[in-house]
Image (cartoon, rainbow, N blue to C red):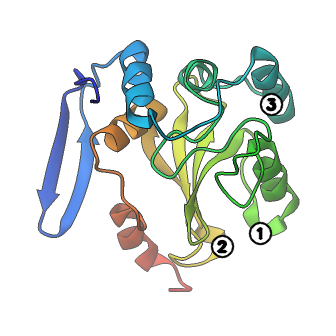
Amino acid sequence: MIPKLRARTAVLTILDNPRSVAEDLDVTDDELILATRARVAGRGLPGPASAKDVAGFERIVGHPMPELLKRIYLEVANGGFGPSRVLSLTDTGNWFSDRADIAMAYHDFAADPDHSLPPGVVPLMDRGCAMWALIDFRTADGQMWDWDPNLCCLQHALAPLEQSLAQWLTDWLHGVMPDEPYSHRELSSRDCPHW
């Protein structure tokens, strides 16, 4: 059973376009961690990461990990949580993508000139079909980004989601995380000259 969150989240349905708008997010990190732990119970996830694992990845990125993400890695599991299973900090033997860990994904994105990510924006979760959820280590609340080259072209594959990690997790816990492209991204991609 997932603990009930105190977040006041309005879920709007506009014709066939369901979306979540997190308003006045009123949930604590402790509540999100408890709810995340309850949601992933029984998934057979790796144990929590170590502080050394976190520090090592922070050195690679050159920015501190957003506190909520750090706590989930340290208190819940070293990967596997989230809608499509967030990457592990280290190779745990449980791959949640075609990459062993988050450092491999970060290096792969950095090495590919077609995946030009701003420094500090980290691939967090493989959404399938070349789509990724990314997190901005430059922001204390972990602003989320989307990578979707299927919408238009590689030049326009990256876009901010305009939600924090807490809001993103709240959407997942409430079951409103899309499996396909985010609807607002799909509509805006039509402005791409390569569409």
* Amino acid type at image mark 3: Phe
Callout 1, which amino acid?
Answer: Asp
Question: Compared with residue 161, is residue 113 higher up or lower down, i.e. above or below?
Answer: below
Relative to 88, residue 18 above or below = below
Q: Residue at x 27, y 19 (%)?
A: 26
Number of other residues with Cα within 10 Å of mark 3, as a class: few under 14, some 14 to 19, many 20 or more: some
Residue receiving disc 2: 154
Left or right placement of residue 57 versus residue 17 in this view? right
Q: Earlier in the sequence, mark 3 or mark 2?
A: 3
Q: Nearer the viewer, mark 3 or mark 2?
A: 3
Find residue 90 and report its image quarter: top right
Q: Between disc 1 and disc 3, whose residue precedes?
A: 3
User: Could you say where residue 99 lies in the image, as x and y percent from the top left?
Assistant: 76, 55
User: Which residue is painted at 80% across and 43% down in the image?
Assistant: 103
Q: Name the residue nearer the viewer: 181 or 3.
A: 3
Position of the N terminus, as image quadrant, is: top left
Callout 1–callout 2 Cβ contact below 8 Å: yes
Question: In which quadrant of the rendered view does residue 97 lie?
Answer: bottom right
Q: Position of residue 31 (x, y in %)?
A: 36, 17
Which residue is tagged 3? 57
- At 83% from the left and 64% from the top, the residue drawn is 112
Disc 1 is placed on an element classified as helix
Of mark 1 and mark 2, the one earlier in the sequence is: 1
Going by the numbered disc 2, the residue's amino acid type is Leu
Q: Determine which of the numbered discs, if any, sits on residue 114 in the image.
A: 1
| Residue count near mark 2 (Cα–Cα under 10 Å), binned few <14, some 14–19, many ≥20 | some
Observer-side mark, 1 or 3, equals: 3
